[in-house]
Image: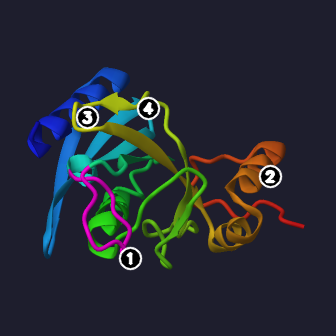
Amino acid sequence: MTAPTVLALVDDALANHYGQRPGRASVSFVGVAPIEILRFEQAPGQWAYASLGMSATPMTAADEFVVSGDGPRAELLLHVRDEAGEYRDVWRKLAILAAAPAVEGVVYRVDMTVDLGEPLAPGSRCTGGLLVPGPLAAVETGEGTVEVLRVVPAVQTELAWARVRGGAALRERWEQAGTDLLDLARGSVSLD
């Protein structure tokens, strides 16, 4: 099976999950196949952005000498509330995160933190996120299973805290506080 076939299966799984064909944008990075970002409207003012392209090849850690043919494959998903269209550029940052496995040799996994060191979009206080299981079942492609990992937006203090205490501890804090995880302008949950 070829990479385009893998991507077509993931594309279909995302469209079936959201019940609509998405808007599309594409970004190219030097030495990396283009990354598409798909945009789905979940509800009025609520958007789901999904990467498409990261799963074309298995993720391989930077310290590995050989690219693994059977390594993990994944795509990223980001949910945001954006009733006024303030965060439309968030797709560009998601594309950067989706390119990291190919560019930097990152292998994404659940409860891992990702931090860009700058806002996810103008007006956002969140600079990265915590990777959690996505709402879609893993996509079987014949070339391997593709996990769709959700990037839950987080501010830098939350990300630093999660690197010490673990992603599960941060998720627990968010749940206890009733944190609005779709709000890119929110502040940090209490970490005392």
Label number found at residue 10: 3
Closer to the chain start, of discs 3 and 1, is 3
Which of pointers 4 and 1 indicates the residue nearer the eye? Answer: 1
**Three-letter amino acid code at the position of disc 3:** Val
In this rendering, would 156 be left or right of 33? right
Quadrant of residue 190 within the rendered picture: bottom right
> Would you say residue 96 is visible in this rendering?
no
- The magenta stretch is 57-69
**Mark 1, residue position:** 63
Which of pointers 4 and 2 indicates the residue nearer the eye? Answer: 2
Density class for disc 1 (Cα within 10 Å; few <14, some 14-19, many ≥20) is few
Looking at the rendered structure, the secondary structure element under dot 3 is helix
Which of pointers 2 and 1 indicates the residue nearer the eye? Answer: 1
Residue at mark 3 to residue at mark 4: CA–CA distance:
24 Å
**Mark 4, residue position:** 44
Residue drawn at x 50%, y 68% is 123
